[in-house]
């Protein structure tokens, strides 16, 4: 069977691995991006993204000519039969969706689309975006959706740092404007994933599935965070309690932390809130969960202030060391990271902030407003705050810590060891006492 020609709009964390995987399966793939530096790097076979396995894969598919990058989306669309849109979908300062990248990619496609083509949206979007925004733009071509061209929506759920494995093994949800679009999209993705293809009734259901998944996780983390604050006031160790509660066969409480970052969990619930409000349906729980998670960085900076006051120091003028800028362990992504808010709060309170992250460049650290230093220097500050669960930090022992206060916002180090060495070790919702049995 003749392979379809693909164009993928957006060569970022999700678009580039997707393009490379299809190219590896011998599809002729054109990748479109608006960033010329990204395009020239990709065309030289160099990945602009740190992702295990991607460097080798990209080099191979660029060298064999199956993947080529371009800035010209209209020309790319004219010369393909399937166009996939994987561009960013952030929220603005009012927490409303910014779909400008999706509309701009679709404008390009509308100028190049031909009869019989299929357009697939993979960007995470508010419910009804395909029907109410994407299709009207595509129909500016003079062609009619479902009559002249197909439309499908499929969300991506790959985990950074394990993206290639998850893209080729996770189940994939697909909903189309009609059964033919759903089938064509399903047949396409079967080329790159061994995972189950789960088809749903229509476009909007598939859009909603992605938002429900991330809202479930964000809400669960908010519950864990609220429980951690309650446990803190009750002198109960929240991690001990959650671990025990999770032995219940139907309980799975997530892990509390300093807030929720990244491009998905901290944004996607707002897409539901926005559409629910438009339709007059309240999203109280989802909004509350967001506000709990967004309050956690303030809790961390207040904790710093409280612990410093115990040794007669004030945040103003103190040196605070931050371990980890990335929003989660072993990744370089700092988008929406709680560390950014913690640093900002501490600086407002007059602290001098020093930071280390093995995955984040000194330049990025300085842009956030902290001095970029080696780990030793962080561990010598008046107070150390561990924000990210990088593997590099698992080996921190009390002997390495010159500070008398260590605030550990992730449950990755053993508190007892620090206590026994005279360091005031504080966790979120942590309470340490000898076991009663
Ligand atoms: N990163 C993740 O873990 C993840 C997981 C699931 C879903 N998603 C969703 O996938 C989408 C893309 O996310 P990402 O993390 O890959 O973003 P990203 O920021 O890493 O990459 C997006 C790329 O799109 C390019 N771009 C912007 N506007 C464009 C346009 N009009 N035409 C062509 N290219 C354009 C950017 O230059 C950038 O290179 C988002 O909707 C996101 O919510 C991301």
Image (spheres, helix red, strand yellow):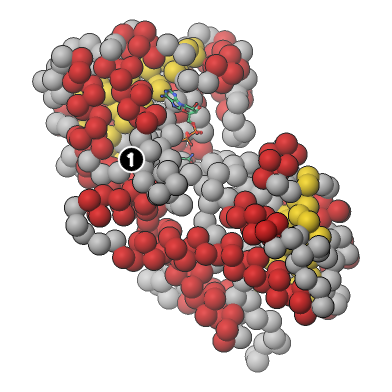
User: Which one is nearer the viewer's eye here, 325 or 238?
Assistant: 325
User: Which one is nearer the viewer's eye here, 360 or 341?
Assistant: 341
The residue depicted at 42 percent of the width and 15 percent of the height is: 29
* Residue 245 x, y percent position in the rendering: 48, 77
User: Which one is nearer the viewer's eye here, 213 or 145?
Assistant: 145
- From this viewpoint, is residue 323 visible? yes
Residue marked by disc 1: 125
Crowd band around label 1 with a 10 angstrom C-alpha radius: few (<14), some (14–19), many (20+):
many
On screen, residue 343 versus residue 29, left or right, reads right
Query: Which residue reaches farthest bottom?
Result: 436
* Residue 275 x, y percent position in the rendering: 26, 49
The residue depicted at 40 percent of the width and 49 percent of the height is: 94
Location of residue 103 by image quarter: top left
Query: Which residue reaches farthest left?
Result: 147
* Residue labelled 1 has its Cβ within 8 Å of some atom of ligand 1: yes
Location of residue 413 by image quarter: bottom right
Of the 4 image quadrants, the one containing the C terminus is: bottom right
On screen, residue 183 versus residue 109, left or right, reads left
Residue 421's place in the image compared with 272, above or below, is below
Q: Secondary structure at mark 1?
A: loop
């Amino acid at each position: 069977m003749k392979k379809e020609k693909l164009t993928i709009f957006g060569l970022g964390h999700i678009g580039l691995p997707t393009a490379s995987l299809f190219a590896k399966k011998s599809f002729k793939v054109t990748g479109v991006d608006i960033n010329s530096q990204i395009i020239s790097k990709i065309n030289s076979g160099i990945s602009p993204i740190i992702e295990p396995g991607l460097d080798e894969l990209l080099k191979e598919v660029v060298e064999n000519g199956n993947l080529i990058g371009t800035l010209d989306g209209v020309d790319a669309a004219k010369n393909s039969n399937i166009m996939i849109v994987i561009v960013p979908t952030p929220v603005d300062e009012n927490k409303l969706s910014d779909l400008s990248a999706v509309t701009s990619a679709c404008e390009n496609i509308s100028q190049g689309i031909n009869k019989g083509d299929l357009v697939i949206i993979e960007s995470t979007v508010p419910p009804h975006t395909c029907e109410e925004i994407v299709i009207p733009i595509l129909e500016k071509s003079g062609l009619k959706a479902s009559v002249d061209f197909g439309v499908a929506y499929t969300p991506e759920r790959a985990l950074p740092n394990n993206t290639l494995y998850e893209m080729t093994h996770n189940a994939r949800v697909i909903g189309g404007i009609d059964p033919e679009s759903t089938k064509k999209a399903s047949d396409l993705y079967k080329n790159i994933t061994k995972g189950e293809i789960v088809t749903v009734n229509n476009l909007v259901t598939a859009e909603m599935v992605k938002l429900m998944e991330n809202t479930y996780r964000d809400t669960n983390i908010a519950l864990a965070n609220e429980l951690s604050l309650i446990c803190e006031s009750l002198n109960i160790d929240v991690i001990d309690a959650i671990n025990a509660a999770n032995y219940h066969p139907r309980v799975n409480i997530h892990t509390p932390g300093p807030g929720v970052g990244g491009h998905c969990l901290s944004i996607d619930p707002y897409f539901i809130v926005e559409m629910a409000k438009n339709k007059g349906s309240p999203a109280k729980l989802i909004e509350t969960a967001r506000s709990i998670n967004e309050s956690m960085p303030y809790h961390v900076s207040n904790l710093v202030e409280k612990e410093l006051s115990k040794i007669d120091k004030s945040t103003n003028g103190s040196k605070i060391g931050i371990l980890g800028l990335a929003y989660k362990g072993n990744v370089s992504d700092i988008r929406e990271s709680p560390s950014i808010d913690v640093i900002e709060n501490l600086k407002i309170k007059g602290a001098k902030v020093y930071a280390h992250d093995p995955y984040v460049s000194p330049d990025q650290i300085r842009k956030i407003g902290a001095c970029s230093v080696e780990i030793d220097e962080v561990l010598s500050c008046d107070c150390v705050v561990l924000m990210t669960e990088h593997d590099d930090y698992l080996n921190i022992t009390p002997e390495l810590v010159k500070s008398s206060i260590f605030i550990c916002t992730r449950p990755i180090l053993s508190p007892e060891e620090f206590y026994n060495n005279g360091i005031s070790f504080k966790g979120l919702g942590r309470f340490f006492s000898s076991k009663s049995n």
